[in-house]
Image (cartoon, rainbow, N blue to C red):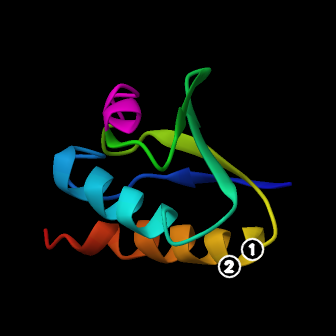
Amino acid sequence: MIGKSFIIKNKVGLHARPAAVLVQTARMFKSDIIVEKDSKRASAKNAFDLLGLAVEKGAVVTVEIEGSDEREAMKAFEELVNNKFGEKE
């Protein structure tokens, strides 16, 4: 298992569109991907659960990934965060 913390940088946090992008990306991997904020945990493969975390801009989330392709999945998550989930500000 690997884990890493990230600061969410996009303007409105993980609202519906970036959450959908995250879910679509997470589902490409076999590994289990968990996103945690303020002790609440959600599967990155479930948009409803992700939205329940109420992640705003500037929030710190921790991502834990476990499985055969965990390194590739973490790299993809890092790219999403660094690219602000494809949103323009």
Residue name at image x 56 percent, y 54 percent:
6
Q: Is residue 32 left or right of residue 55?
A: right
- Mark 1 secondary-structure assignment: loop
- Mark 2 secondary-structure assignment: helix
Residue name at image x 44 percent, y 66 percent:
81
Give yes or no for residue 50 being in the magenta stretch: yes
Residue name at image x 62 percent, y 20 percent:
39
Q: Residue furthest top?
A: 39
Q: Is residue 15 left or right of residue 26?
A: left
Image quadrant where residue 56 sits: top left
Q: Residue furthest left?
A: 89
* Residue 61 position in % (x across, y down): 55, 42
* Residue 44 position in % (x across, y down): 49, 48
The residue that disc 1 covers is 69
* Residue 28 position in % (x across, y down): 51, 72
Amino acid type, label 1? Asp
Q: Is residue 34 above or below residue 29?
A: above
Quadrant into which the N terminus falls: bottom right
The residue that disc 2 covers is 72
Residue stretch rendered in magenta on the structure: 48-55
Q: Nearer the viewer, mark 2 or mark 1?
A: 1
Cα–Cα span, label 2 and label 1: 6 Å
